[in-house]
Image: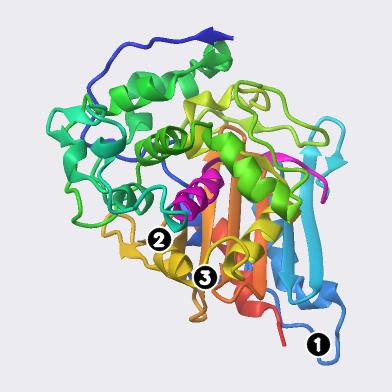
C-alpha cells in the first residue's frame, strides 16, 4: 500500500457536492411513487411476508430495469423479517444477490461515529459543545477556517461550514474518476484529507446544514484524541461486538471484501451514455475513513439501527440530541447527529442514513420508534433517475402493512 501525498488544489466553489462526495441522500427524497415502482396493496387476508412487501419487491425490480446490476433489501416490521432481491451479484455468472452479501456501506459509517461521540459525552470524556480546536489545536485553520469557532456537534450535523475535501477535482479524479484504477490502493492520512479541505474557505458556518465528509474525518480524529484508540477500535468495542454485528467490519487499509459479496460495478461517475463499466470491488477506503469505510450486511445494519432507536446504545437525552435535526436549504434534507430525516409521500417521517462509494449505493431507514426498518444495497453506481431508488423506500414505508 502506498501513501499518497497529493497536490493541494483549490476547491471549486461551484462543485460543492460531486457525485462521489455527497451521501446518496436522493435515495430518501420525498416523492410520489410512480407506477413503475408502486404495486397494488396485497389482497385482503394475504398475511404472507411476500404479499405484504409486494410493492417493495416491485421497486427492487424497477431498480434493475433502470439499468443497475442488482439490489438486495431486508425489511423488518416488528418480529417479521423479509428479504427481497433483483438482478445479479455477478452479471458474468448470474449469481443472485443474497441475504449474506457484504457490501461497502460508505457514509452509513457516520452513524457509528456519531454514536461513539455521544457515548463519550455521556461518560463526560468530552462535550459536544467543546470546540474542535480544544481537541485538535491548529488543525482547522487558514483561509477563514477557524476551529475555535466550531463545536463538535456542528461536525456531526454538518453545520460547521467546512468544505468537503472530496470535492477537490484532482482528488475526485483519483478516487472516483478515471484515475481510480491506478490509485485504488493508495493510502490517505486523515490529517492530509483535512488539510486539503483547509485550502478552501468555509461556507456559512452555523447557518444551516451543508454535507461535508471533512466533518467526520475530524470526528474520527477527535475520538482517537479522547480515547487513545482509533475510531474503528472504539466503534467495534462499543457497538459492533455488544450488538453481535458479526458481519460488520472496519477494513482500514485492507482493499479486499469478506465473502460472500457482490461485484461492485462502477462507471467512475462518467456522464457519457454507455460509459465503460469497471470492477471497483477492491479499494482502499482510507480516502473516506471515518466518513465512510464500514463494510456490513442488510441484516447487521437493521440490527444496528433498531438497537440505536430502541435505546440500547444511547440514553434518552443523547437520542434526543441525535434526532434533533437542522434543515439544509441546499438539498432539502434534515440532518441530525450522524443521521438524516425526511418525510415520505404518504406523510411517514423516517430517519436513516445513506452511503455511496464506487460500485455501491446503500440505504438505511426506519420509523422513529424503530418498529419498521429497511436496509438495502445496489451494487452499481450510475443511477439514471433518483425517483426509481426513492421508490424502494417509499414503497416499503407507504405500501407495507405493519399492523
Q: Are marks 1 and 3 in contact (CB under 8 Å)?
A: no
Q: Which residue is mark 3?
A: 350
**Residue 231, position in %: x, y?**
52, 36
Q: Residues within 10 Å of mark 2 (few under 14, many from 20)?
A: many
- Per the model, the C-alpha gap separating discs 1 and 2 is 38 Å
Q: Is residue 30 visible?
A: no
Q: Which residue is mark 2?
A: 336
Q: Is residue 50 above or below residue 219?
A: below
Tell me which residue sits at (81%, 46%) in the image: 97
Q: Residue at x 53, y 32 (%)?
A: 229
Q: Nearer the viewer, mark 2 or mark 3?
A: 2
Which residue is drawn at the image coordinates 72% and 88% (left, top)?
Answer: 403
Q: Which mark is residue 43?
A: 1
- Does the rendering let one see residue 203? yes
Image x and y of residue 139, in percent: 26, 27
Residue 145: x %, y % from top left: 17, 34
The answer to whether residue 147 is magenta is no
Query: How many residues crowd mark 1 within 10 Å: few (<14), some (14–19), many (20+)?
Result: few
Q: Which residues are magenta?
A: 99-120
Q: Secondary structure beneath disc 1? A: loop
Chain-order first, disc 1 or disc 3: 1
Q: At which x and y percent is residue 185? A: 58, 15
Amino acid at each position: 500500500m502506498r501513501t499518497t501525498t497529493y497536490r493541494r488544489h483549490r476547491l471549486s466553489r461551484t462543485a460543492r457536492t460531486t457525485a462521489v462526495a455527497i451521501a446518496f441522500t436522493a435515495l430518501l427524497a420525498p416523492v410520489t411513487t410512480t407506477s413503475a415502482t408502486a404495486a397494488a396493496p396485497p389482497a385482503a387476508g394475504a398475511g404472507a411476508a411476500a404479499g405484504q412487501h409486494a410493492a417493495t419487491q416491485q421497486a427492487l425490480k424497477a431498480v434493475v430495469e433502470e439499468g443497475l446490476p442488482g439490489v438486495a433489501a431486508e425489511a423488518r416490521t416488528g418480529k417479521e423479517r423479509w428479504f427481497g432481491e433483483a438482478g445479479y451479484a455477478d452479471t458474468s455468472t448470474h449469481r443472485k444477490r443474497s441475504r449474506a452479501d457484504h457490501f461497502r456501506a460508505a457514509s452509513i459509517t457516520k452513524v457509528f461515529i456519531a454514536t461513539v461521540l455521544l457515548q463519550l459525552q455521556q461518560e463526560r470524556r468530552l462535550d459536544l459543545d467543546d470546540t474542535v480546536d480544544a481537541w485538535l489545536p491548529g488543525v482547522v485553520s487558514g483561509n477563514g477556517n477557524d476551529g475555535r469557532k466550531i463545536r463538535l456537534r456542528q461536525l456531526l450535523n454538518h453545520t460547521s461550514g467546512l468544505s468537503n475535501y472530496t470535492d477537490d477535482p484532482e482528488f475526485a479524479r483519483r478516487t472516483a474518476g478515471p484515475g481510480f484504477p491506478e490509485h485504488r490502493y493508495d493510502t490517505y492520512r486523515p490529517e492530509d484529507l483535512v488539510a486539503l479541505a483547509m485550502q478552501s474557505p468555509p461556507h456559512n458556518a452555523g447557518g444551516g446544514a451543508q454535507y461535508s465528509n471533512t466533518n467526520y474525518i475530524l470526528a474520527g480524529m477527535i475520538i482517537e484524541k479522547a480515547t487513545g484508540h482509533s475510531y474503528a477500535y472504539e466503534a467495534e468495542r462499543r457497538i459492533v461486538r455488544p450488538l453481535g454485528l458479526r458481519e460488520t467490519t472496519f477494513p482500514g487499509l485492507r482493499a479486499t471484501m469478506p465473502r460472500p459479496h457482490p461485484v461492485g460495478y462502477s462507471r467512475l461517475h462518467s456522464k457519457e451514455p454507455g460509459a465503460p463499466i469497471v470492477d471497483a470491488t477492491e479499494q482502499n477506503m482510507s480516502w473516506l475513513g471515518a466518513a465512510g469505510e464500514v463494510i456490513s450486511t442488510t441484516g447487521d445494519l437493521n440490527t444496528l439501527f433498531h438497537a440505536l432507536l430502541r435505546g440500547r446504545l444511547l440514553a434518552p437525552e443523547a437520542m434526543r440530541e441525535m434526532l434533533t435535526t437542522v434543515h439544509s436549504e441546499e438539498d432539502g434534507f434534515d440532518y441530525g447527529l450522524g443521521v438524516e430525516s425526511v418525510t415520505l409521500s404518504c406523510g411517514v417521517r423516517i430517519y436513516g442514513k445513506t452511503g455511496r462509494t464506487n460500485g455501491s449505493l446503500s440505504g438505511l431507514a426506519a420509523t422513529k420508534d424503530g418498529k419498521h426498518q429497511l436496509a438495502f444495497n445496489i451494487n452499481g453506481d450510475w443511477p439514471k433517475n433518483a425517483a426509481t431508488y426513492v421508490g424502494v423506500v417509499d414503497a416499503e414505508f407507504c405500501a407495507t402493512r405493519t399492523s
